[in-house]
Image (tube, rainbow, N blue to C red):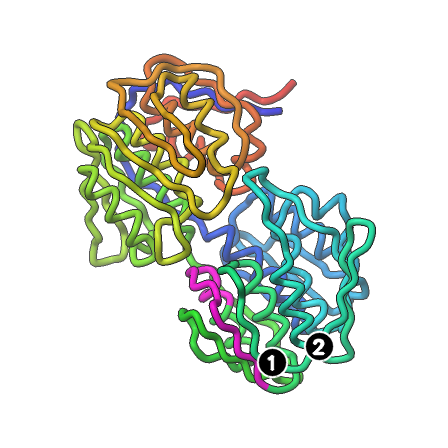
Amino acid sequence: MDSIKIEGGARLEGVIDISPAKNAVLPLMTAALLARGVSKLTRVPDLADVRTLGKLLANLGAEVERDGEGLVIDTSSVDGWDAPYDLVKTMRASVLVLGPLVGRYGKARVSLPGGCAIGARPIDQHLSGLEKLGAKVTLEHGYVDVEAQRLTGARFVFDVVTVTGTENILMAACLAEGTTIIENAAREPEVEDLARCLVSMGAKIEGIGTAILTIEGVTELAPYEYEPVGDRIETGTYMVAAAITGGELTLKGARLEHLDAVTEKLMQSGTEIISLDNGDVVVKGGDHSKSVDMRTSPYPGFPTDMQAQFMALMAVSQGVSVINESIFENRYMHVAELIRMGADIRLEGHTATVLGVPALSGANVMATDLRASAALVLAGLAASGATVVGRVYHLDRGYERLEEKLSAVGARISRISAT
């Protein structure tokens, strides 16, 4: 397995291009199944998760090909409805084929999903929503089988806010007969992006960007050509990179309006953030960050996907920070690794108390999930000496060319390829 080595202490300065959002691209890829023909995403990051989902779509009979920076998906020959364990186990987002397959073909067989080990993420809400739309759901031998002649519109209220659950039911409802009302829907920008793409395909959706979505079913949808929204989590990660190194970065293609909660907390810590007229964002780190309390919550709250990175900053900030993780019960696995680097962090249930230290020390650490990987890289940027982050296959699932982008702005970082 590859590792990443960081020689800490370098101040970052320069320009970083923000990639399209992985969490927008993946549902958009599965949305291509809702129409027959050739759909195109004009910009797609080169990530392990994108490649894995491409293999899954190919397993269903689609043709998936790179076209420069974009991706072309031809669904003309789709003839399968089975998402097997060996593909789904590595990436939870694979479950997003469920809604489109049932919505268009009336059946799907999908392995129960895997992905990062950050806590239980069941798909019971997905299945309850499909049952409400008239589907028959059977669970057996680690697979879920869903069948329906044609889905029928209904009112469905999510018990908890779920991004992939909202996306699955939204896609399925577009081809259902009648009107579907989804309440307590996820409001994340990636969900909004999917809805706007579906409208471009001919779907009738009202309430985009709100917690109540109303979908008037249509009999068919057309293929799309669409540019996904920029990655707000990648943007937030590089914002922290500027803050933790006392650097100054210009982030091109950033969407600051999608990061209000992160921006507020960083500014409270002493980071200067400037939105330029052309949409770019300038982030200037101060000499010493101040500790800030934070609690994760569904959008528009502070994203759970930024908790680990923010903790890395708090580990070297002045004062005491109290961080509460309210989304996933097992998303503090990076804490032990940060402590190996000299961080002073104490856990009690879902709460982490972080006492800032003057400096971290480089060490050999192990990534446990996607965002923990990014946090350890950020900690390495601020640490004295060398940090080696192992298991960076997690990182490759969600960050495009991270070491290349950081190296271009002054980081002393390199990849150690497995032999």
Assign a secondary structure to mark 2: loop
In the foreground, 408 or 303: 303
In the foreground, 234 or 76: 234
Residue 39 is tagged as none
Residue 414, x across and y down, in percent: 46, 23
Quadrant occupied by the N terminus: top right
Amino acid on which disc 1 is placed? Ala
Give the residue at x 46% y 60%. 190
Q: Earlier in the sequence, mark 2 or mark 1?
A: 2
Residue 17 against residue 347 in the figure, above or below: below
Give the residue at x 24% y 18%. 358
Residue 154 is tagged as 1
Residue 121, x across and y down, in percent: 59, 49
Amino acid on which disc 2 is placed? Gly
Residue 402 as seen in the image, left or right of residue 247: right
Residue 406, x across and y down, in percent: 38, 32
Give the residue at x 67% y 49%. 113
Disc 2 to disc 1, C-alpha distance: 9 Å
Residue 160, x across and y down, in percent: 51, 60
Q: Residues within 10 Å of mark 1 (few under 14, many from 20)?
A: many
Give the residue at x 66% y 42%. 90
Write down the residue under mark 2. Answer: 134
Residues at circles 2 and 1 in contact by the CB criterion of under 8 Å: yes
Residue 28 as seen in the image, left or right of residue 233: right
Residue 359 against residue 192 in the figure, above or below: above
Magenta stretch bounds? 179-194
**Per the image, is 181 magenta?**
yes
Quadrant occupied by the C terminus: top right
Residue 63 as seen in the image, left or right of residue 316: right
Q: Which residue appears farthest toward the top when viewing the image?
A: 385
Q: Residues within 10 Å of mark 2 (few under 14, many from 20)?
A: some
